Amino acid sequence: MNRLTYILIIILIFSCQSDSENNDHWGGISPDLISAVDISDYPKVSSYNPTFYDENNNEINFLNTLIQNGVNTIRLRLWVNPADESSSLNEVKEFSDELKSLGFKIWITPHFSDTWAHPGQQQIPTNWESLNFEELKNQLYAYTSQIMNEIDPDYIQIGNEINTGILFPHGKIADNQEQFVELVNVSANAVRNNSTNAKIILHCAGFESSNWFFNIVEEVDYDIIGISYYPWHHGKSLDDLQNQLSNLSINFNKEVLIAETSYPFTLGWNDWTNNNVGLEEHLILPDYPASPQGQKDFIRDVKNLILEVNNGIGFCYWGADRIAWDGETSTNGSTWENQAVFDFDNKELPVLKEFNLN
């Protein structure tokens, strides 16, 4: 073999490797990329029998439309003992089985609470309140193990938006950082001991304090850094978001994703329940107005910035299902209908096209 032939072979090998690497990222064939929606309320929404339509006003099936538009993962919240069956273990298990049969991967978000958990609220489940710390750790291990054995998710979070901790007062970072880390470790160990495939996500709301937070949990055995990004809460610079995601990936050598995001297609409303977003000051203007195109462009750019982040693996759109399910005059309906992926006539919005990774 002469030297020129050898050089040409080497070039060809590296060229093939490069193509393979590109095919494993956005627009390619990698099974590890996440194009997700959180549709935790869909069992409740579907009980009202809404009819959904495509862009040509043909009746469509909600879940099939997600598949056809490229969604490959469904994120579901889980509450310990909710006031009703919503987000209970039984409901989430049954829904997960249905979703798996359709080919979706399952991403479970246990809040380790009977209700919403987020940075301002991490209420311990009522039935766990009397437990001392050692008993709480045992209960947490058993509960996480039950989730893994009964639902067998592809992805599982250890809590939801745990910037301030979990299972207050025991795991409040400001009061006892060591106990917080211990609790997260207990739950992570339960995942590892009951599954060889599930990936563990640690989830921080916003990115400004994320370096501080992920330094705290550096000793925890986990796989993925998850960040919530809502412009009205977490800043209006996508450049800052991208830079910080890149920093997190480099600093902690983890895969990264946007665990929650969304954007309004209007500032209007379709029921009498106050919406979370309804003012122009909540928007990124002039780039992303509250319009179907503005919503689509925002998610397109969020998707693209994840593409450019080293070890960026995807995003999840929160509340995709949260139409005004309880009727136009409900004061106990949706706070999110102007951010769903269907409009006020339950017609699919252009944003759905941005979930396709091909």
Image: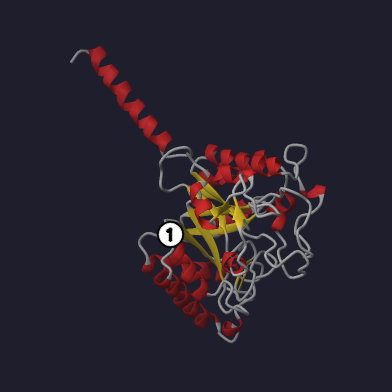
Above or below — where is 256 with respect to 334? above
Location of residue 239 by image quarter: top right
Q: Which amino acid lies under the numbered mark 1 shown in the image of this protein? A: Asp
**Residue lying at the far left of the rendered structure:** 1
Q: Is residue 26 shown above or below 218? A: above
- Residue 215 appears in the figure: no
Q: Position of residue 185 (x, y in %)?
A: 48, 67
Q: Residue furthest bottom?
A: 130
At label 1, counting other C-alpha atoms closer than 10 Å, the crowd grade (few under 14, some 14-19, many 20 or more) is some
Badge 1 marks a residue whose secondary structure is: loop
Judging from the image, the colouring scheme is secondary structure
Q: Where is residue 61 in the image (x, y as percent from the top left)?
A: 53, 56
In this picture, residue 280 sits left or right of residue 172: right
Does residue 224 appear to the left or right of 326 in the view shown?
left
Which quarter of the rendered picture does the N terminus lie within?
top left
Q: Nearer the viewer, residue 143 or 268?
A: 268
Can residue 353 be seen at all in this image of the molecule?
Answer: yes
Depth check: 79 or 321 in front?
321
Left or right placement of residue 281 versus residue 164 in this view: right
Please state the horizontal and vertical placement of residue 117, each as a whole percent of the image: 63, 68
Extreme residue in the front direction: 58
Q: Where is residue 68 in the image (x, y as percent from the top left)?
A: 49, 48
What residue would you read off at disc 1? 154
